[in-house]
Image (spheres, rainbow, N blue to C red):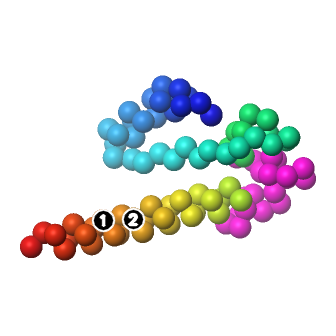
């Protein structure tokens, strides 16, 4: 996905005005996914597809969960740092 897509589509403005975070997952190309599209349906994960694609163990969902868990951990650390600095 080119930067132009997510910079110009308008989602960022909407998210900013509504205090939302938008994730734009990136991937690489392979013989089944020549454009490197995020694999929403699981069809590009392998030649047969990802049979777990719609479960927490599927490649796509588990990646999103990891991103969200990491983001939450960073947020909690920031809250702790800010609280400790504010007497």
Q: Where is residue 68 in the image (x, y as percent from the top left)?
A: 50, 61
Highlighted range, magenta: 40-58
Mark 1 burial class by Cα count in 10 Å: few <14, some 14-19, many 20+: few
Residue occupying the point 51% across, 47% down: 23
Q: Based on the displayed image, in which of its 4 quarters is residue 3 positioned?
A: top right
Q: Residue 63, relative to residue 39: is it above or below?
A: below
C-alpha span from label 1 to label 2: 6 Å
Q: Position of residue 54 (x, y in %)?
A: 72, 58
Q: In this view, does 32 lie to the left or right of 5?
A: right
Q: Where is residue 19 in the image (x, y as percent from the top left)?
A: 33, 46
Q: In this view, does 66 lie to the left or right of 30?
A: left
Q: Residue 9, relative to residue 15: is it above or below?
A: above
Depth order, front residue of 18/5: 5
Q: Where is residue 29 in the image (x, y as percent from the top left)?
A: 75, 40
**Dominant secondary structure (helix, strand or loop) of the stretch shown in magenta:** loop
Residue occupying the point 71% across, 67% down: 57
Quarter occupied by the C terminus: bottom left
Residue occupying the point 65% across, 63% down: 62
Q: Do the residues labelled 1 and 2 touch (CB within 8 Å)?
A: yes
Residue highlighted by disc 1: 78
Residue highlighted by disc 2: 74
- Residue 76 located within the stretch drawn in magenta: no
Residue occupying the point 90% across, 53% down: 48
């Amino acid at each position: 996905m080119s930067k132009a897509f997510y910079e110009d589509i308008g989602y960022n403005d909407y998210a900013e005005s509504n205090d939302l975070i938008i994730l734009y997952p990136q991937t690489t190309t392979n013989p089944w996914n020549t454009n490197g599209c995020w694999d929403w349906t699981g069809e590009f994960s392998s030649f047969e597809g990802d049979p777990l694609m719609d479960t927490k163990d599927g490649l796509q969902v588990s990646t999103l969960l990891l991103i969200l868990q990491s983001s939450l951990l960073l947020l909690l650390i920031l809250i702790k740092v800010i609280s400790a600095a504010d007497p």
